[in-house]
Image: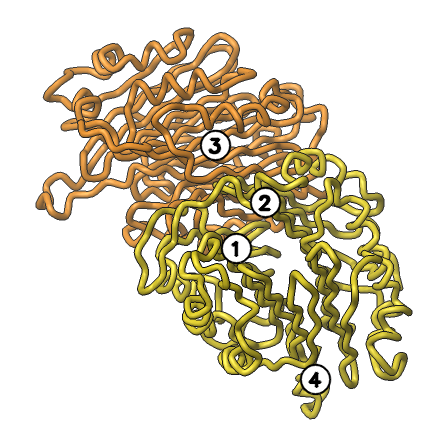
Chain colours: A orange, B yellow
Amino acid sequence: MDQQDLAMPDIAHFFEGVEKLLEIWFEESSSPTGDLRNITRPEWENLLRHVKCEIISFTKNDFIDAFLLSESSMFVSKRRWILKTCGTTTPLKCLEQLLKLAKVHGFSVISDIFYSRKNFTRPEVQNSPHKGFYEEVTYLDTIFPEGRSYCLGSINLECWYLYTFSKPELKALPDIIVEENNIDADPDQTIEILMQNLDKNVMSVFSKTHCSTGTEATAHSGIDQILPDMVIDDFLFDPCGYSMNGINEHGEYMTIHITPEEKFSYVSFESNVALNNYTKLINQVIKTFKPGKFIVTIFANKSSLAYETMKELEIEYSTLSNWKRTDMQCCNFPSYNLLFAQYSRAVEIST
Amino acid sequence: MDQQDLAMPDIAHFFEGVEKLLEIWFEESSSPTGDLRNITRPEWENLLRHVKCEIISFTKNDFIDAFLLSESSMFVSKRRWILKTCGTTTPLKCLEQLLKLAKVHGFSVISDIFYSRKNFTRPEVQNSPHKGFYEEVTYLDTIFPEGRSYCLGSINLECWYLYTFSKPELKALPDIIVEENNIDADPDQTIEILMQNLDKNVMSVFSKTHCSTGTEATAHSGIDQILPDMVIDDFLFDPCGYSMNGINEHGEYMTIHITPEEKFSYVSFESNVALNNYTKLINQVIKTFKPGKFIVTIFANKSSLAYETMKELEIEYSTLSNWKRTDMQCCNFPSYNLLFAQYSRAVEIST
């Protein structure tokens, strides 16, 4: 990722790869022309100023607009908005402006909200309202009074936080109505794989000393083989760090962000690709990046292919060789199931 | 429950019914005479001084010793110790003494530890180290360095905390060894039902104005019908409040504690009775006490009848009529599965 603080002495050099992830779904617009993709580039640039990041690349197809940011990614489709930002960015600070822009473009009803992140490596360097999960929840509660907040994994060791609507009700908000989830919703699923303590030979690919372009790093690392139907927009940062967005003809996306420095290496993989079994994909991602430990989260709504098979995945996960599952939790929300699992290498392999 | 502060003006009258629950399993003793039930009454009384509660009644059978306490209950079997205390008691403060006593009586290896509680209604009146879950975890970590801590339910609304060994390893402790869980463990399961906002007509039974003895309250309320094979030891507090322990010929226990005051009514039900389906039991408990909302937790180890059927329970729970499930989570620990579910009345019924 883009690292502004390289001029500082090495002892102080640190970059928080762990992202804050916001996903908002709006109810179908009553206006036939309602589409979040009608929001203009200057409007997005203005909104992202609140987050403290910038657009560095852009691709699109008939279903989805994909922005590469100086810190991670933004995806915009007709009624869904995803913002994923790392470092010390402040994504929650753009929420009010996002809701205003959405309203102008035909969307005043929110159906689902997810805000999630892993525990930060260094929470003390974050800016308000991201200094802690309680501060984030307090901030979100001022905008969405019906949210629920969760901590999965072990609070005192490593965990993953989630703020979501799990009890949606008809509710009047300042200019925004939040209403009951539609059970006949479109199929939706999201898988995230958050990796740490990565193999340093694999990580060395994602620096300007080894590759001159993002495209070279994408091919050399095997990222282009993970989901081969994705059209990839990639970026290699100077002196190191990597981001990519991929979109395919079904409107699905994938996104990978890499902080390669050995002392705080971090790689995130995320996709909404519809599969009825994620074991093969997880194995491919793990084989590509060789982490020392990782977290997997899978969200699937009742219409998703993945929904019924999550129970099976619980069992299949445990057969991943060389990996010890240190935690597994499952949550049932009104319209989504969530599976959370944490793994570390059973035997440390020196790299 | 025993309420010391009745002399205070009514506006300040409050009793924390929510219990702190500690359960410790020791590995089989190498000494053939090793048995926690050899710990003497004066030794227990001395230990409970650290907790700030007293023994008020005692029953036993061939398998289990059951103590009624001024604040809840203690159960002692050969290698398992359970302490459940409410109010402003400090159960964690007796841990070091418990480990010393266990060692004297043949047990120096801990196989499982569970410390759990619902969020307090008034955390600010608790004493250290129970002023918050972080303080409790910090305290437990000084004694058991391999513990993991969890928060189930919604952090910002209502939740249930758990501290447990989920990654047991051979570990040297000051005079105590904690080792790998035995997969061939005895079958074990625990169900808890924690109820609030209870029906005031039902609660009125548990006061001296309605009943003169615990036995009368037990029969009048239908508590003796919940698990009819239990031999019951009950106590009615003055002016109100109720506790009972039940033990049966299989060495199983049940325990119920009632804080009936309308402003902070609370009833807890707990049992380790082995059933392959808990739906009927849950329905009977709910019908007996008529809560406005409740939490169910079920622990089951791999040898338990309940282990395989917890998946079914996930579905069956949702059919409880008139109840809206506001949360459900499932955790897989190395030797136990845990199911957590939270319900509130779908339609408020005036009482």
Q: Amino acid at mark 4?
A: Ile
Q: Amino acid at mark 1?
A: Leu
The residue closer to the viewer here, A76 or A168, is A168
- The residues tagged by marks 2 and 4 sit, at their Cα atoms, a distance apart of 39 Å
**Residue B278 occupies quadrant:** top right
Asked if the residue at tag 2 contacts the one at tag 1, i.e. Cβ–Cβ closer than 8 Å, the answer is: yes
**Circle 2 is placed at which residue position?**
B338
> The numbered mark 3 sits on a residue in which chain?
A
The residue closer to the viewer here, A196 or B102, is B102
Disc number at residue A297? 3
Within 10 Å of disc 3 (Cα), the crowding (few <14, some 14-19, many 20+) is some
Are the numbered discs 1 and 4 placed on the same chain, yes or no? yes
Within 10 Å of disc 2 (Cα), the crowding (few <14, some 14-19, many 20+) is many
Q: Amino acid at mark 3?
A: Thr
Residue B288 in sight in this render: yes
**Circle 4 is placed at which residue position?**
B11
- The residues tagged by marks 3 and 1 sit, at their Cα atoms, a distance apart of 21 Å
Kindly report which numbered mark, 3 or 4, lies closer to the viewer in this rendering.
3
Residue A124 relative to residue B247: left or right: left
- The residues tagged by marks 3 and 2 sit, at their Cα atoms, a distance apart of 19 Å
